Image (cartoon, rainbow, N blue to C red):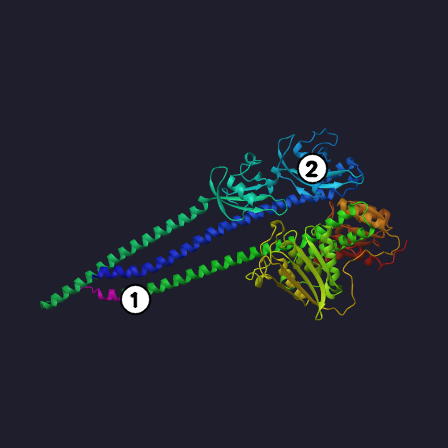
Amino acid sequence: MKVKTHLALMVAAILVPLVLVAALILFLLLGQERESALRSMRELARATISEIDQEIASSLAISQTLTISKHLNDGDFVQFYEQAKLANKQRQTYTSLLDETGLQLFNTYEPYTAELRPPRPATTQRIKEVLAKDTWQISNLIQGSRTGQYVIAAEVPVKIADGRRFVVTEWMYANSLQKTIPHVGVPNGWLIGVFDRNALTVVRNQRHDEAVGTPPDPVVANAIRAGRQDVFKALSREGIEVYVVIAKSPLSGWSAGLGVPVAEIEGAARRAVLMGAVGLLLAIFAGALASFIIGRRLVGSMRQARESAMQLGRGEMPSRLHSEVAEVDELHQTHYEAGKLLQEANEARARHFAEMQQAQSLAEAQNKAKDEFLAMLGHELRNPLAALTSGISLLKLKNVPEVTKQRAQDIIERQTQHLGTIVDDLLDTQRILGGKITLIKQCLDLSQAVRECLDTYEAHGKTRDYTVTLTTEPAFVDADATRLNQMVGNLLDNAFKYTPEGGTIEVSVSIEGGQAVLKVADTGVGISPTLLPNIFDVFVQGPVTNRAKGGLGIGLAVVQALALQHGGTINAASPGTDQGSIFTLTFPISRKTPRSISGTLPAHSLQHLVFLVVEDNVDARDTLYELLTSLGHTVITAENGVDGINKAMSNKPDVALIDIDLPDIQGYEVARRLKSESQSAGIKLIAVTGYGQEADRRQALESGFDHHMRKPLNTDELFTILSSYSFTH
């Protein structure tokens, strides 16, 4: 072979591995780029439906709060109208009160005396469904009969003192939800839409007025109804082919859909491939050109050498020519140096690739931490909120036995305290799984905790479709009451979640081998042999019989973490799929004096006191007023800081309960002014606030407060504090 052929082979030997490696890296990077875009779509869809849920939950909270209004219960609709308008003041929402036929008694969008139209058949039917179900619901998209605009509503049934039934509706215009759709960082071509349970468009980030009230492309509509979770292709309203991902709301049943043009994602891949192909062609061309030039130079050197040899053969003095042999030697050295540079370039590329993977892993870990936090938040709050709702519903019923009312009151008090503890713990949620939470252990009866948890489930109707058996004997353990309820609740939730309706759930508490043993056995879907070893890992869960009952797979992981911190164990067993499962939770037997988990409000024996309550929240102020006056004390109220100072000066109360966030001046300033005046310096000042960090407590004490208490106010703690003082009148 000629020198040029050797050089061409040498260039090929260098370029081919480089091209292959570059192509592989390009392929991997393209796949990661596409997956990153799809992952961003999923996260944005979840963020959108989360924002919508927060807005709807706020409206639902207002409706539920209004249903316990004294004015409504007494049938004083004029005052209830004013109270509803005040509740709507800071939001773009309106309140309607409808009777059983769907007739509006008033609508805060209109004056109270305004003449309202008779209900449409669809409205009557919807109200009947709400009253029949006797529970709140989030409506689908509704077109207003008067304005023709689309609205959505949070509807809550209520029964007042004279036996009449109504529905309190908190409604808003659908276009007001546009502010909840993410805009910052969202490319212009991305389409975000929110759809109701009928797959009708509620709100859209582009061409909202044209889309609202109409269904999307049939492929998207069918996917929404089927609860489809994967990424698929469809046509947008504009006729553009898009990738689509859907996130469904557990609160309203609505869905958020995100569409990204296929060309936008695939176009980047095609451009990258084209650039790579052009780069490879340029590299090949450069190699061929270099081979030609170098080969030509080498051939020239050989010809010069041959000419010199011929000159010597002829006996002639060779010409003084520049020898090309040294150039060939330098070429070898150059190759060595080029190889070294290439190695350094490969190492730098590998280092950059590793740094990119590390950054990606960090981003995924942070995203996982966020999802874990949100899942823990919903899981921690849902059970106590359900218990509170059931307890309040029981107290509203007539002819309820006194013992049942007392049990409901116990449940409400216990779960309220539970919620307060959870709010504190939410600031450091991940510490639960890390085993870093602080436990307040007491000697408690495990069987009592199980009975009370089942009582709460029964009150909420959760056991209605199951056969539940309970076998217990006293079993006292050293445990944190809140965490014990959490462990029991998670195991029972797991049984109900994975057992089809009509199934059997057997719960037992016994003492075995010096251990307190809780067993929860069900006839549900069971656990496959491949899933069983990992059943206590975070986010691991089996197929749920009803998607509405599903969670994010953290309950059993929480139970295991808490069990270990209590010195106990948790085990799972199952014969296999569709053969049920058994969860066994064990604790060491306690040697301390037993205490009850339930708490009742103690009979306070304090002398008659005069309280000043400075609170801008009407419901919180009225509730505290009723509580303290029912205990025989005199209560003076003020809705802002200046009014509170004036009433303290003129009435000289024994105790002042002062909120921190007031509409005019902060509670810290109120305390400083009262302590600076001789006539009010003797008043016992207690800060009652939602700010519960150590820095907040320290600031309150430095401002002149005698004590700092977190909301919700614990009356036991309050009267324990006051009992240490001597009050003279």
The one of 401 and 362 positioned closer to us in this rendering: 401
Residue 259: x and y, percent?
A: 51, 43
SS of the residue at dot 1?
helix
Residue 479: x and y, percent?
A: 72, 64
**Quadrant in the rendering for residue 574:** bottom right
- Residue at 30% across / 55% down in the picture? 284
Q: Label 2, on which residue?
A: 127
Q: Quadrant of the N terminus?
A: bottom left
Q: Work out whether mark 2 precedes mark 1 in sequence or the reverse, and give the earlier one.
A: 2
Q: Which residues are magenta?
A: 319-329
The one of 475 and 77 positioned closer to us in this rendering: 475
Q: Magenta segment: does it hold 323?
A: yes
Q: Label 1, on which residue?
A: 333
Q: How many marks?
A: 2
Q: Which amino acid does the dot numbered 1 rest on?
A: Gln
Q: Is residue 658 left or right of residue 581?
A: right
The one of 495 and 620 positioned closer to us in this rendering: 495
* Residue 430 visible in rendering: no
Residue 149: x and y, percent?
A: 62, 33
Residue 329: x and y, percent?
A: 26, 67
Q: Residues within 10 Å of mark 2 (few under 14, many from 20)?
A: many
